[in-house]
Amino acid sequence: MANIKSAKKRILVNETKAARNKAIRSKVKTTVKKLDAAIVAGDKAAAQTTLISAITDIDKATTKGVYHKNTASRKVSRITKAVNAMA
């Protein structure tokens, strides 16, 4: 454990930020899993509505610095491609 006051604060702040990032990342994963389930089920309408919410969640995560811009772009591209391939 750190002895310096600023180092103690950094530890606390980093834990808080890590928890926030983990929650955001988890939300994105959950939405993508729902999308995958809709794709496997062959439900085009549900897949398209879930795609919109998944893209929104990924964009929010990118804005908050959880994902790099290129990572988010790659994820969006892959899920969009999967939904478009359903037709």
Image (spheres, rainbow, N blue to C red):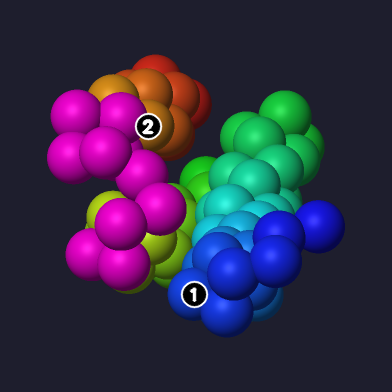
Q: Is residue 29 left or right of residue 69?
A: right
In magenta, the rendered stretch is 63-73
Give the mark nearest the N terminus, 1 or 2.
1
Front tag of 1 and 2: 1
Q: Is residue 69 left or right of residue 9?
A: left
Q: Quadrant of residue 65?
A: bottom left
Q: Position of residue 13 (x, y in %)?
A: 55, 75
Q: Quadrant of residue 78?
A: top left
Residue in the picture at 40% in, 53% down: 66
What amino acid is at disc 1?
Answer: Ser
Q: Position of residue 87 (x, y in %)?
A: 40, 27
Q: Say which residue label 1 marks.
A: 6
Decide whether residue 80 is among the magenta residues: no
| Residue 75 numbered mark, or none | 2
Decide whether residue 68 is among the magenta residues: yes
Q: Position of residue 52 (x, y in %)?
A: 36, 62
Residue in the picture at 30% in, 30% down: 71
Residue 26 can be seen in this image: yes
